Amino acid sequence: MEKHFAILVGGIAVIIVRSLLGEGKMNTVLSIIVGVIVAFILFFIL
């Protein structure tokens, strides 16, 4: 269950970062990278 939570938080992080940076191909890529990193960190902590 914690693993699903980590993925969910990672997805939320992507949305938050993307809304802060705005539209654009580079911003989308950057926000996805941030989201993946956040998900991985939580994945190993939990």
Image (tube, grey):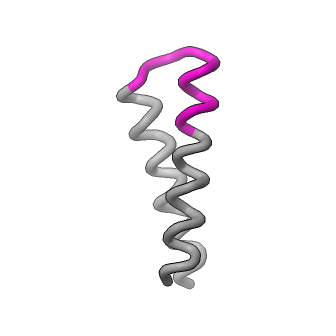
* 5 in relation to 19, above or below: below
**Residue 30 percent coordinates (x, y):** 57, 33
Labels in figure, total: 0
User: Which residue is depicted at the point 47% across and 60% down?
Assistant: 9
Compared across the picture, whether 39 is left or right of 12 comes to right
**Residue 29 percent coordinates (x, y):** 63, 31
* 23 in relation to 44, above or below: above
User: Which residue is depicted at the point 59% across and 65% down?
Assistant: 40
**Residue 19 percent coordinates (x, y):** 40, 29
User: Which residue is depicted at the point 51% across and 43% down?
Assistant: 14
Q: Which residues are magenta?
A: 21-31
Compared across the picture, whether 42 is left or right of 4 comes to left
User: Which residue is depicted at the point 41% across and 24% down?
Assistant: 21
Q: Is residue 23 magenta?
A: yes
Question: Residue 37 versus residue 3: which sits nearer the camera?
Answer: 37
- Majority secondary structure of the magenta segment? helix
**Residue 18 percent coordinates (x, y):** 46, 31
Q: Is residue 24 magenta?
A: yes
Q: Residue furthest toward the left?
A: 20
Question: Residue 39 versus residue 15: which sits nearer the camera?
Answer: 39
Place residue 1 in its image quadrant: bottom right
Compared across the picture, whether 37 is left or right of 15 comes to right
* 31 in relation to 5, above or below: above
